[in-house]
Image (cartoon, grey):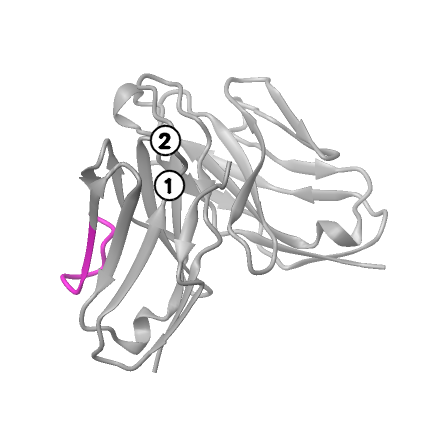
């Protein structure tokens, strides 16, 4: 299996520009998570989807952030306008949620390192 | 709410030394517990897991035992190698049944550096 695929691996942009991060989950997985990692705050859950439906977006920092999952094999995280404090590594992860107690472990992509100057 | 607390790092060891990284948690119900490892420039990878009290997860020489009485899941390895240098994350899953969707709560991570 190809694993969770994220693109781009690195993104450098200027303050005020729109940034779009992309994620392809593992085929057959029905839950998708977006995390942000910084030295100061560690790993933060931004939003997660189940069966393409957003379940909890309480971790999204502000209205400049939005995420979509138009189908089971693709999700985007958009920042508009971007600010220097958005600089971080953004991870996408997926799992198979079977309901009840059982869920498969999270599988992470290699992340997108975003730098906003 | 759920939370995970890991020992503060960074941890620096010599090759073949014994490793312990402490992890304690707060949760309602009976969560599953995990250790993930992150190598430089990569995403997190599952290292081991335990789904119920007294279970021992193990992989690649690492072990951790689910201790409900002390709400702990400490990671141990008897003899570390340079290649074990990475960031280690303890995590728990929500045990509230069908609404968890696989969501994990992570600790802050512990940086491990092993010198030859």
Q: Position of residue A70 (x, y in %)?
A: 19, 43
Q: Residue at x 30, y 28 (%)?
A: B100
Question: How far, Cα to Cα, is label 2 from label 1?
Answer: 7 Å
Labelled disc at residue A33: none
Where B69 sits versus B93, above or below?
Answer: above
Secondary element under disc 1, as helix, strand or loop, is: loop
Q: Position of residue B80 (x, y in %)?
A: 79, 46
**Relative horizontal placement of residue B103, taking residue B80 as reference (left or right):** left
The residue stretch that appears in magenta: A58-67
Query: Tag 1, which chain?
Result: A
Res B101 quadrant in image: top left
Q: Quadrant of the C terminus of chain A?
A: bottom left
Q: Which residue is mark 2?
A: A29
Q: Position of residue B70 (x, y in %)?
A: 54, 28
Q: Residue at x 57, y 24 (%)?
A: B67
Based on the picture, tell me whether residue A25 belongs to the magenta stretch.
Answer: no
Q: Residues within 10 Å of mark 2 (few under 14, many from 20)?
A: many
Secondary element under disc 2, as helix, strand or loop, is: loop
Q: Residue at x 52, y 33 (%)?
A: B34
Query: Tag 2, which chain?
Result: A
Q: Residue at x 52, y 37 (%)?
A: B24
Res B94 quadrant in image: top left
Q: Which residue is mark 1?
A: A25
- Evaluate if marks 2 and 1 touch, with contact meaning CB atoms under 8 Å apart: yes
Where A21 sits versus B104, above or below?
Answer: below
Q: Nearer the viewer, residue A88 or B9?
A: A88
The prevailing secondary structure element of the residues shown in magenta is loop
């Amino acid at each position: 299996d190809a694993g969770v695929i994220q693109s781009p691996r690195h993104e450098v942009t200027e303050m005020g520009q729109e940034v779009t991060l992309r994620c392809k989950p593992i085929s057959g997985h029905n839950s998708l998570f977006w995390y942000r990692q910084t030295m100061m705050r560690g790993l933060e859950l931004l939003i997660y989807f189940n069966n393409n439906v957003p379940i909890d977006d309480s971790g999204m920092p502000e209205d400049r952030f939005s995420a979509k999952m138009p189908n089971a094999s693709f999700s985007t995280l958009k920042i508009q306008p971007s600010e220097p404090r958005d600089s971080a590594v953004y991870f996408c992860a997926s799992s198979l949620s079977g309901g009840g107690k059982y869920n498969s472990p999270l599988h992470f992509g290699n992340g997108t390192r975003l730098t906003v100057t | 709410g759920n939370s995970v607390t890991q020992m503060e790092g960074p941890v620096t060891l010599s090759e073949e030394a014994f490793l312990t990284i402490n992890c304690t948690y707060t949760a309602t119900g009976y969560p599953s517990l995990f250790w993930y490892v992150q190598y430089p420039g990569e995403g997190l990878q599952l290292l081991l897991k335990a789904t119920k009290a007294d279970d021992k997860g193990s992989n690649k020489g690492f072990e951790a035992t689910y201790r409900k009485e002390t709400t702990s899941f400490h990671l141990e390895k008897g003899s570390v190698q340079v290649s074990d240098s990475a960031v280690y994350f303890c995590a728990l899953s929500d045990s509230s049944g069908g609404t968890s969707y696989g969501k994990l709560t992570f600790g802050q991570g512990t940086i491990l550096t092993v010198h030859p």
